[in-house]
Image (cartoon, rainbow, N blue to C red):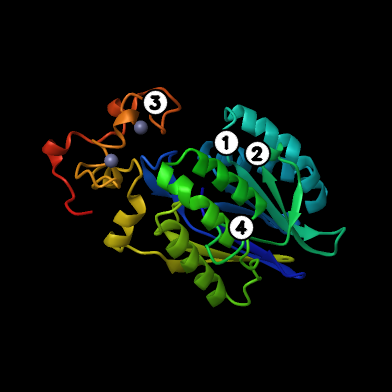
Amino acid sequence: MTMIGFATYGDHAEFITDTANYTKYVESLGTTTKHITINHIDAACLTQGDGHFGDLAMSALLQVAGQVVGFDELTLHAPKWLDEMHVDAERPENCLVFLIGYSEEAGEFVAYVYASEQGFKRVKVSRWIFPAPWNLQPSGIELRRTRRYIDQAEQSRVDLWPQVEASWTKRPKMTAPASVEEWVELAKSVREQRCLDDFAQIIVHGKVVHTRLERGTVASSVVHDFGSDDTALLKMLRGTRHPFGQMQACWCGSGETYRDCHLRWAWDQPCGCHKGEKLFKDCHMVPPSAEIGVIAGL
Ligand SMILES: [Zn+2]
Ligand SMILES: [Zn+2]
């Protein structure tokens, strides 16, 4: 998962992404760019979810985009080649692809979302923010995914969810930001509410890249940096399998590290970074706490 927001404005479209790149359970955290632009058809593609699938989808896109007449044709062909790439990537869950561009048919900029769980069916959307902050209504896709996530979460979250869901779904829908400053404010609220908050947390990190897409022109720039605030970083990684997550005190209050407490069940499970080739304890698990010390009090 990752942060992606966009809006179409008739004669142009704008979108933002963060730059965090991470493995399934955040065993490792890096940086990446999440969009590519296809200037000859005034279009852009963004991917969210499994990184390997995203890479395959992007490279297939470059081939397909060279064979189509325009953006409209590209969007119609997309379900087929996205599904083929998804098979090649061994069908990872929760993948999203967005195509944003100028439609000759509509005479304006339009955007489509393709979700793996919907067989990459083409769905038109005019505004999007994912993850949605708690003060904005989530998309149907995000709501369904969060429900599935909560189903597997620990009991205290399951108990809290009906309340959260009831208020979240009554929130107003996202409005299209009117300036780059408003995009930055939106990105900050996403990070604050959905990444640094403890409930149904999603990693949002690195820099915020803003892109404006017009006919014949595309301009991208870094408009914000979530920065190197160590406290925020540790808070973000709490409860993940990143080394900084493993070594923090377990969320249950046992006084043990997360690694030695509620993560113990995963030691003999396949590591999230290797598609089951190696066990977690032989791969991304940090050495015993006695050997490297504990990040106290976190
Ligand atoms: Zn615990
Ligand atoms: Zn690993």
- Pointer 3 and pointer 2: residues touching (CB < 8 Å)? no
Q: Is residue 55 left or right of residue 250?
A: right
Where is mark 4, residue-wise? 138
Q: Is disc 3 surrounded by few (<14), some (14 to 19) or many (20+) residues within 10 Å?
A: some
Give the spatial CA distance, label 3 vs label 4.
Answer: 32 Å
- Pointer 1 and pointer 3: residues touching (CB < 8 Å)? no
How many numbered markers are drawn? 4
Give the spatial CA distance, label 2 vs label 4.
Answer: 18 Å
Q: Is disc 2 surrounded by few (<14), some (14 to 19) or many (20+) residues within 10 Å?
A: some
Find numbered disc 3 in the image and state the secondary structure of the residue it sits on. Answer: loop
Q: Earlier in the sequence, mark 1 or mark 3?
A: 1
The image shows residue 79 at horizontal and vertical percentages of 74, 39
Find numbered disc 1 in the image and state the secondary structure of the residue it sits on. Answer: loop
Against 184, residue 17 (above or below) is above
The residue that appears at 59% across and 41% down in the rendered structure is 95
Q: Quadrant of the C terminus?
A: bottom left
The image shows residue 15 at horizontal and vertical percentages of 61, 63
Q: Earlier in the sequence, mark 3 or mark 2?
A: 2
Where is mark 2, residue-wise? 116
Give the spatial CA distance, label 3 vs label 2.
Answer: 23 Å
Find numbered disc 4 in the image and state the secondary structure of the residue it sits on. Answer: loop
- Pointer 1 and pointer 2: residues touching (CB < 8 Å)? yes
Residue 270 is tagged as 3
Where is mark 1, residue-wise? 93
Q: Is disc 1 surrounded by few (<14), some (14 to 19) or many (20+) residues within 10 Å?
A: few
Find numbered disc 2 in the image and state the secondary structure of the residue it sits on. Answer: helix
Asked if residue 70 shows in the view, the reply is no
Q: Nearer the viewer, mark 3 or mark 4?
A: 4
